[in-house]
Amino acid sequence: MTQGERTAREALALEIARERLSVLAPLDVARRAAVAYEAMNGAASTGTFRVPLLGDTYRVTFPAGEVCSLAGKAAPGITVALLVLHYLACADGHPPAEQWAAFRELPDGLVYDRALRGRVQAPLVGAFSRDPDLLGRAAAPLGGVPLAVGDAAYAFDAFPRVRLAVAVYLGDEELPSTARLLYDAAAGHYLPTEDLAILGGMLVGRLLAEARYR
């Protein structure tokens, strides 16, 4: 795929996501996604959502679906914009399962599982297996909460109702160190599985970036 074809495909995906959101009732969207919605001039049909994502907050206009950062940062890339729009449009209000699932256990997770593991497992092991405490220091800026899983593990509210976790298991003379990316089992009620793979990769990328500064 050429760069031009990729750009056209991304533009089309963004247009479809905006159209999908625009036909929904914004107050219902806000309730199902557990985000704030501020109506403009008292008319609920026009306003803005505030959507937290991995420690940042994004403003989404309704019904136009324009996404911008509230932190004064540059406009988010199309990947972030699509994740935010898809989260708003897909959220169905299903309660969290409060049970962790491997990515392959999510709906259609097996389709993307090998590619996702290839992108996240080796980097996590390389960054945190020699110093598990480093995971905690990297997790703190992202709101990570310690979990009693493996030798070091932290949970993250990626979106208000999409929880992810990263766990590191130290090896020994017989077994190598491993790492796992986990999802609340209800995550499929809020994002398509392909988007959940992207979200997991984004979380790992942020953790690795934080680790480099610690």
Image (cartoon, rainbow, N blue to C red):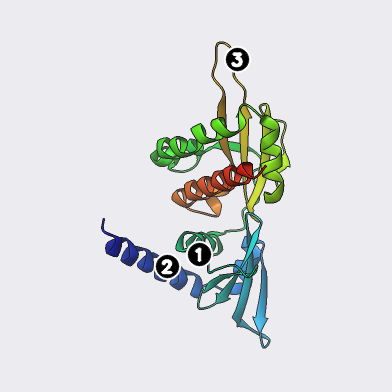
Which of discs 3 and 1 lies nearer the camera? The answer is: 3
Q: Which residue is mark 3?
A: 172
Instruction: Return the x and y of residue 18 as percentages of the image width and height.
Output: 46, 71
Q: Residue 81, which numbered label?
A: 1
Q: Is residue 23 visible?
A: no
The Cα–Cα distance between marks 2 and 1, rounded to whole angstroms, is 8 Å
Labels 2 and 1: the sequence-earlier one: 2
User: Mark 3: which secondary structure?
Assistant: loop
Q: Residue 14, which numbered label?
A: 2
Mark 2 residue type: Leu
User: Mark 2: which secondary structure?
Assistant: helix
Left or right: 143 in relation to 77: right
- Residue positioned 63% across, 54% down in the render: 54
Instruction: Return the x and y of residue 136 as percentages of the image width and height.
Output: 71, 38
User: Mark 1: which secondary structure?
Assistant: helix
Labels 2 and 3: the sequence-earlier one: 2
Labels 3 and 1: the sequence-earlier one: 1
- Residue positioned 58% across, 48% down in the render: 206
Q: Quadrant of the N terminus?
A: bottom left
The Cα–Cα distance between marks 2 and 3, rounded to whole angstroms, is 47 Å
Residue 175 appears in which quarter of the rendering? top right
Classed neighbour count for the residue bearing mark 3: other residues with Cα under 10 Å, few (<14), some (14–19), many (≥20): few
